[in-house]
Amino acid sequence: MPIATVNPATGETLKTFDPMGPEEIERRLAAAYAAFRRHRSTDFAERARLLDRAADLLDEDRDTIARTMTTEMGKPLAAARAEAAKCAKAMHWYAANAEALLADEHPSQGDVRDSGAEHARVHYRPLGVVLAVMPWNFPLWQVIRFAAPALMAGNTGLLKHASNVPQTALYLEDLFRRAGYPEGCFQTLLIGSGAVEAVLRDPRVAAATLTGSEPAGRSVAAVAGDEVKKTVLELGGSDPFVVMPSADLERAARTAVTARVQNNGQSCIAAKRFIVHTDVYDAFTARFTELMAALTVGDPMADSTDVGPLATEQGRADVETLVDDALQRGAVALCGAKRPESLSNGWYYEPTVLAGVTPQMRIHHEEAFGPVASLYRVEDLDEALDVANDSPFGLSSNVWTRDEDEQRRFARDMEAGGVFFNGMTASHPAFPFGGVKRSGYGRELSGHGIREFCNVTTVWYGPAE
């Protein structure tokens, strides 16, 4: 993929960028390492001052950067503004909480004496330069949820962003520069995917984090493993949305629509598989389909638009392939399953509901990265769990039930990094975020996320002579 801004609403290439050459990459690696050696010694008050300033600037820039994001990847403008606001909020959160999250831990006095020590503690120290390989779907949020905790921990960052959001990537570097961060603390690398391995293998890079596809995660993890470097991977998701008989069906149906088409359906934690108890299947399906069919597809810059274009032409083709395969194998389209006739330019696809999805269809096992919902009818809780867990992914999950026994069972047995009851999966800086199985490993956000890129150090003091 060339490094370029291509408007997905029109297919027009607006701006292209030359990839950085070896000399510029080397200059930036050297600057990142030099900055780390200084930044790791700063106190939390100084780090918080810088991050708070960056958050304030982002709030001031909200409308401008929102338009850039919408132009580059097609999300509705209102959603882009909300993403920018969410990022600023998370930055303030880490500025306020990082010191407490990384406070020294003190083992019990009994354990300290048993070890032969006078006293001991566990200390969190930064690892170094962290390489972030980030996707286009949330071009600000995916970066900030790595950058804010990494910088507050005393690390420095190198961003290799998706090639179709270069202006957003350059904005992020400029944001941290304007906030007063010293040169090298946060830099963008305009490079193609083929240049990532050499950067990751460089001894000045201590660790890597990647959000993206499973193949990309495998590639980065293989290189990092060969170099014995820490990685955090947040990969795909095919989240279940389970509706049981005690659910508030109107709320569940409305939330299901938002959960499926948020970000034009291009979200790892979007609900994708709707698993509905037979007692409420017909009522839920009718309402859900009605609401999906009523969504307005159109220009993402327009306030009236609910669903904009998919980010890339290939992305739409991939969605069409999955839907066509399902239809050929017996699924039924209750709405959508085609390109809007009134939008001949751009990479639009209608919100789609497929009923009768079975394990023989590719969409049952693969992630549909677009506004396509798969419906399943189940007889009881056990079957609901079986269908929900019958996926190579395990990022998050939604369950609609007011039965406390059912809630305990789903919380215990759902194979996912999160279980959200009677609401939509969402990320928040206070809660750990990540998955199991092929959705990756490690956690972002919360105290768990900030500690991922820390050296957890035992400090032991023997008895004084």
Image (spheres, rainbow, N blue to C red):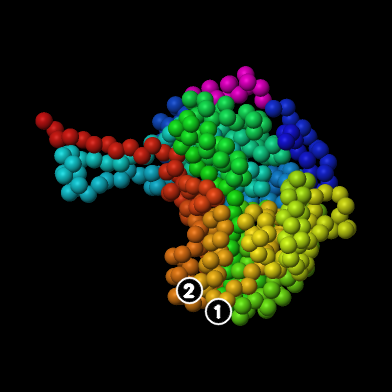
* Above or below for 227 versus 50: above
Residue at 51% across, 52% down: 437
Q: What secondary structure characterizes most of the magenta part? A: helix
Q: Position of residue 424 (x, y in %)?
A: 58, 64
Image quarter of residue 395: bottom right
Circle 2 residue: 406
Q: Position of residue 240 (x, y in %)?
A: 58, 63
Q: Amino acid at mark 2?
A: Glu
Residue at 51% across, 76% down: 402
Q: Quadrant of the C terminus?
A: top left
Circle 1 residue: 246
Q: Is residue 264 visible?
A: no
| Segment tinted magenta in the rendering | 20-35
Q: Are marks 1 and 2 in contact (CB under 8 Å)?
A: yes
**SS class, disc 2:** helix
**Residue that extends furthest to the left in the rendered view of this protein:** 465
Left or right, residue 139 beside residue 53: right
